[in-house]
Image: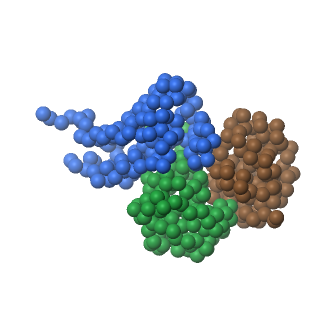
Amino acid sequence: MERTENNILFHRIFPIEGGDFTNAGSTSDQIKKILKEAGFSNTLIRRICIAAFEAEMNVICYASKGTLSLYIARSFLKIVVNDEGKGIRDINLAMSEGYSTADEKIRELGFGAGMGLPNIRKNADEMVLTSQFNQGTHLEFTVYLDRQEAALPFE
Amino acid sequence: MTLKEVKDILSAEVISGDHDLGKEIKCAFAAELLSDVLALAQQGALLITGFTNSQVVYAADLANLCAILFIRGKKPNEETKRLATQKKLPLLTTPFMMFEACGILYEYGLKTCAIEMENGKDGK
Amino acid sequence: MTLSDLVKSFGLKIEAGKDRLREGVTGGYASDLLSDVIAHSRKGNVWITIQTHPNIVAVATMKELSGIILTGGRQPEAETIQKAEHEGIPILASPLFTFELVGRLYQMGISGMSPC
């Protein structure tokens, strides 16, 4: 069967435990390794991984648990994050720079500056964010490879 | 400015990571909130911070920073040091406070990172 | 050196406490971690940070700091401004990043070590 542009070539799911600050950052780190081994450019890796880090931190800071999935396709890289937790009450507010619902504990750990979601949007080509307050949040963001300078490494 | 010069100027100690102090620092960024670091620090920057948890190493690695300088004699835990060594990211510590450390380095000519993004820019 | 001098020298935006700018500045303290500021800042210090939430006012009041300067073009939250006006804590803002602002303050003679 012929491969299409959107066929998923690689997929991995990473579980994230809410409140697990000890391991915070390890998921994005694993993603960086995968992308580096796959031969993607440094610029691309930096964009996706910074966004993944912010997404990972959001689950740890605000949710009870979640999953982060990495998809590699011929024409794009995509990350999908689903979490269970308090969700986002006002998405527009959440997307504005500087707005934060972080509590003392989170701030003292150096997070909660209110730049996470804006950072994700800045680094992705497309972003979808939906949430049910007190249930959870769904976030996905995509980086298109044909808009990058480097072609897919295993062409 | 190289890492060696920073070490000498601020009486810093190299605590782990890559000991190649000849690395040239592109610019400096002082922050303790990681999202700011990820949003604004440029590749090759020196991060000056009092934040010693392992996330700072992950973040610095993701942002391709040059090295991390901890202030006020702060030292990270073993896990953080191990991570830095694995990633070949130099960690230094200086007895100076953040204010003095920045002031002195600025005086010696180290520049701040330039603003890369435009305000209000949406994803492409 | 007073906060008013700093406003003039750096074109700082006054977000709150415009009547308290004659405060003398004893030194500078730069940190975004509240516990650090509580532990190590000195009375009369001007606090350089990017934190914008209302707790910064409580900290500044507790430590009797002369004022707060937000960097990187940050703006304080509405509740922060309200609290600051109420407590008489000046909040100023600069578009410069922390490293550069501190560098320039240092060159003006403001030090990180304030006299005991």
Q: Residue furthest bottom?
A: B8
**Colour for chain C in the figure:** brown
Q: Residue at x 58, y 71 (%)?
A: B12
Q: Place residue A146 in its image quadrant.
A: top left
**Colour for chain B in the figure:** green
Q: Place residue A112 in its image quadrant.
A: top right
Tell me if residue B83 comes above or below residue A64 in the rendering.
below
Residue B111 seen: no
Give residue C38's position: percent from left, percent from top: 72, 52
Q: Residue at x 41, y 49 (%)?
A: A26
Give residue A111's position: percent from left, percent from top: 56, 45
Residue A21 seen: yes
Q: Is residue B105 left or right of residue A7?
A: right
Give residue A80's position: percent from left, percent from top: 38, 35
Q: Give the quadrant of the C terminus of chain B.
A: top left
Tell me if residue A123 comes above or below residue A88 in the rendering.
below
Q: Residue furthest left?
A: A1
Q: Residue at x 50, y 46 (%)?
A: A21
Task: State the residue in front, C104 or A112.
Answer: A112
**Colour for chain A in the figure:** blue
Q: Residue at x 65, y 45 (%)?
A: C51
Q: Is residue A59 left or right of residue B69?
A: left
**Count of picture labels:** 0
Tell me if residue C16 comes above or below residue B104 in the rendering.
above
